[in-house]
Image (tube, rainbow, N blue to C red):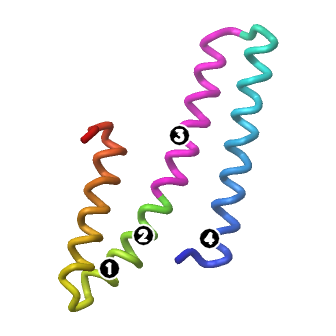
Amino acid sequence: MLSDDEKKKLNNRLRRVVGQVEAVGRMIDDDEYCVDIMMQLSAATGALAKVGEIVLEKHLRTCVADAMESGDQAEREEKLDELIKIFRKYAGVMD
């Protein structure tokens, strides 16, 4: 699980993403240059991806590590299946 400090940092990142997305909306309303809009979208997408990376790393270091150390084969298989689904989704591979 995430510590209170980690949650705070992630929520701060997410607030910045919200601000970036709102800025994109204003840019579209103001008919700003398309390349500038795309750059802002890229920044928001990158920031959101970073949040995902942080959450995934924490999941690997806690939930998955605990499952791998347990003696429960079913739990290990469940976590592996879960990870495979996550990696497929992030890679853009659909089942």
Looking at the rendered structure, the kind of residue marked 1 is Ala
Cα separation, mark 1 vs mark 4, equals 19 Å
Circles 1 and 2 in contact, beta carbons < 8 Å: no
Q: Residue furthest left?
A: 73
Q: Which residues fall within the magenta stretch?
A: 33-53
Instruction: Quickly name the residue at label 2.
Output: 59
Q: Find out whether residue 73 is within the magenta segment.
A: no
Q: Which mark is residue 46?
A: 3
Identified at 73% across, 49% down, the residue is 15
Q: Is residue 89 above or below residue 79?
A: above
Cα separation, mark 1 vs mark 3, equals 27 Å
Circles 4 and 2 in contact, beta carbons < 8 Å: no
Point out the tag, 4 or 3, that comes first from the N-terminus.
4
Instruction: Quickly name the residue at label 4.
Output: 6
Residue 9: name its quadrant.
Answer: bottom right
Point out the tag, 1 or 3, that comes first from the N-terminus.
3
Q: Position of residue 39 (x, y in %)?
A: 60, 24
Describe residue 62's horizontal placement relative to residue 20 as left or right. Answer: left
Q: Find out whether residue 40 is within the magenta segment.
A: yes
Q: Position of residue 36 (x, y in %)?
A: 65, 17
In front: mark 2 or mark 3? 2
